[in-house]
Structures are given as structure tokens and as C-alpha cells.
Amino acid sequence: MSLLPLLAACSGTASHSADGGQPLAGSSGQLDVPANASADLKKQYLLENAKAACMKEQGFIYTPVAPEDPMASWATDGADYELTKKYRQKYGFGVYAGIVYPNDPQALGSRASLENSAETANADYVSALTPAQKAAYDKAMGVPGREAKVSGQLPDGCLTSAYKSVYGSASTKEQSAKAAAEDQTNAQALNGDPELVALAQSYASCLKDHGIPVTTTQPTGIGDMVKLRAGTSAPPGSSAGDVNADGTPVKSMSKDEALPLLTRDIEQAMQDLECGREFRAAYFPKFFKAPTSGDGVG
């Protein structure tokens, strides 16, 4: 999977990671690109720097923020057994952890993590602009609107010029199609790998032995299967923004209500981790060589 910063990632501001640990640009206004970063990650660094340089030429400030390395998130999502075990022993799959640990920025959905994610490098600068200045800023940046999301073409502006300087002149639509084709090829290779297929079957049998339903045994899907179901089956009020059928907000779950659910979440997350230990040990090295957004390994 080519981790292209396509339309979904294009915005006028850049944010920290959930723990607020993403480094900002130094006094030069440019980020130092890590020597050991993957080719895709290096391009994302270069894109941030190009956006900053372009906006400076337009008379605006854009502070580039180091993109998150997906390798770091996968480490606690199954790639590193010990780190994942430590994480899951406290947070489970993360479905209820934010309610039980509201002041913990590592807890998914916690008040602390949401506050940190809102503290973007550019938010204060942009919010201080007058409406006219904000409109000029958005135009200079080339913030995509609805039309761009439909056409796959970014409007003229720093996003477009920076993107082309890093990724070439092909349109985002063409780049996306190329990435999708590469993604599909990698997924087919992983799902057809005899070793992974056999280990996925053993993984599935172990889950069934623990009374956990199995809906897929595909190597690219089984690793995230239990976690995704835990999230989608959570009762209303477990996530911010939950609404009733009539559109009214759902009352947030209390800590006392969430605690027993977190205990069960931890139990199931640990069962899933142990059942999939051998599978993940074989899957991730192959996945990192030819990644795919088929997800499924956390």
C-alpha cells in the first residue's frame, strides 16, 4: 500500500498524534527527514515541508508537522507482541478505555487524547486570522471542497503544487488508482500465502475454542476481526458523538458503567492476542514488505 496523502489527508492544518508527541519544524521552518524512514514516509515529510515553503511565499505561516509513522502504531497493534500485550492488559481494544481513563492521553477516545489531537501546530495561527484572511489562507493552501472530493482533483494552491513536487504531475485520482492496484496485488499475495493461510486457520480454531465467532479466515482480515466487532457491537454512549435513532445525542456512558465492559474487553483482547500470536509473527514481516490497506492484523 502506498501511503499517499490523498484528499482525506489534505487540510489546512496538521495535527499531533494522540499523545501529542509528533515533533514540529525547527527554527528553519522545515522538518528533518529521518534517515531510516520508509520511502512513503519520507515523501510525507517532504510534502509537509513543501506546503510550508509554498505558504511562506504566499505570505502565510504553515508549520509542518512530522507525519505519524504507521510502523509505530502497528507495534502496539500486534506487530510487537510484548508491546501489544502491555497495551491490551490495560486498555483492551480501546473501546471503553477512554471513559475509564479520561485523563490518560494513551486511552483511545479519552478527554486527554481528544484535547491533544485538537492542539494542532497551526490552529492558533489560523483561528487568529480575520474572516477575509482565513478565506485568503484557504485559497492559498487550495483546501479541497466537495467538488474536489468528487473529481479527485485538488484546486490550485499549495496543496497541489506541493503534491506535484513530491509525487509528480499525475492527478490524485490517477495516483489513487495506482495505489489501489498495488494494494490489491499485495492483498492477494498475502491471502494466497500458504503459511499465512494455515496459521490463520489455526488462529480461527483457537478463537472458536474461546467462544469467539469467526467471520473471516483471510490473512488480511482475521487479525482485526475481533477488534472491529468489539467496536461495532459496543452499546450506545460508549463513543463520543453517538446519537439515537431520532438524531438526538446519546448520554455518555459513566465510568462505573464502562468499567465492567472494559474488563470484558481486556479479556477478549488478550484471548485474541494469544490466539493470533504465531499468525502475527509470520504475517507482519511479510506485510511490511508489501503492505495493504486490507487491514486486519491488530
Image (cartoon, rainbow, N blue to C red):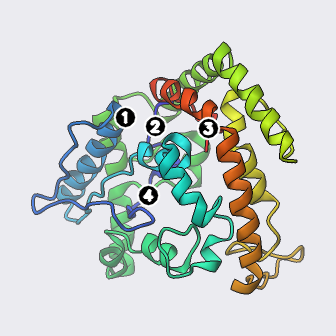
Q: Residues within 10 Å of mark 3 (few under 14, many from 20)?
A: some
Regarding residue 157, the answer to whether it shows in the image is no
Of the numbered discs in the image, which one, if any, rests on residue 163? none
- Of labels 2 and 4, earlier in sequence is 2
The answer for how far apart the CA atoms under marks 3 and 2 are is: 26 Å
- Residue visible at 59% across and 34% down in the picture: 280
Residue under label 2: 3
Q: Residues within 10 Å of mark 4 (few under 14, many from 20)?
A: few
Quarter of the picture holding the C terminus: top right
Which numbered disc, 2 or 4, marks the residue closer to the eye? 2
- Residue visible at 54% across and 40% down in the picture: 152
The image shows residue 200 at horizontal and vertical percentages of: 72, 28
Residue under label 1: 40
Residue under label 3: 277
Q: Are marks 1 and 3 in contact (CB under 8 Å)?
A: no
Residue 92 falls left or right of residue 177: right
- Of labels 4 and 3, earlier in sequence is 4
The image shows residue 26 at horizontal and vertical percentages of: 14, 61
> In front here: 193 or 66?
193
- Of labels 3 and 2, earlier in sequence is 2
Q: Are marks 2 and 1 in contact (CB under 8 Å)?
A: yes
